[in-house]
Amino acid sequence: LGNWHVIVLNVSDSVPFVAGSAQSEWLAADLAGSRKRCTLAMWHKPRFFSSNIAGWTSNVSIIDLWNQLYAGGVDVVLNGQQHQYERMRPMTPAGATGSARGIRQFSVGTGGESSEMPFAIAAGSEALSDAFGVLKLTLDDSTYTWEFVPTVLGQFTDTGSGTCH
């Protein structure tokens, strides 16, 4: 993976992520010890998302995790959970956009039993689809590119690139 540091976390209802927990302490040491320029972190439930429940577009239970990732200079977060594809603008843990250190989040829940197009759209959403498909991430030395590849040709696609902090 060249200049990329990849972190896989176990964050769920049965394994909450809170400041001071064993996983939080492990993450702090892991981030501090990495000498890679770029970092990607992944786990199941996203911090920000669009949904089919009015007003439900963020998961505050993982704000401690996002605070730690943001302070550690993480570039990209990859999640599943929601049954759609969504790419968010680079954001702070509070959801503000425009920060040079913002984290770009991808939610890719597009390979399961069902998909659904949400109506409660998150403020930071840049691309959203209920098409089935996969996300192709290309991780270069100081940049990354993405391409959402639908299972049915001609359906929604999303492409772009970003630069590491």
Image: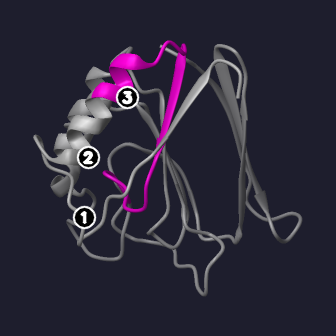
Residue sitting at x 24%, y 71%: 13
Q: Is residue 44 magenta?
A: yes
Q: Earlier in the sequence, mark 1 or mark 3?
A: 1
Residue 52 picture location, percent across and down? 35, 76
Name the foreground residue: 141 vs 155: 141
Can you tell which quarter of the image residue 129 is in? bottom right
Query: Which residue lies most toward the left here?
Result: 20
The alpha-carbon separation of the residues under discs 2 and 1 comes to: 9 Å
The alpha-carbon separation of the residues under discs 2 and 3 comes to: 10 Å
Name the foreground residue: 48 vs 2: 2
Compared to residue 60, the image places residue 82 above or below, namely below
Kindly identify the amino acid type of the residue bearing the numbered disc 2: Gln
Kindly identify the amino acid type of the residue bearing the numbered disc 3: Asp
Q: Is residue 64 magenta?
A: no
Q: Which residue is mark 3?
A: 30
Q: Which residue is mark 1?
A: 15
The alpha-carbon separation of the residues under discs 1 and 3 comes to: 19 Å
Q: Which residues are magenta?
A: 29-49
Crowdedness near tag 2: few (<14), some (14–19) or many (≥20) residues, C-alpha within 10 Å: some
Residue 104 relative to residue 69: left or right: right
Kindly identify the amino acid type of the residue bearing the numbered disc 1: Val
Q: Which residue is mark 2?
A: 23
Residue 114 relative to residue 52: left or right: right
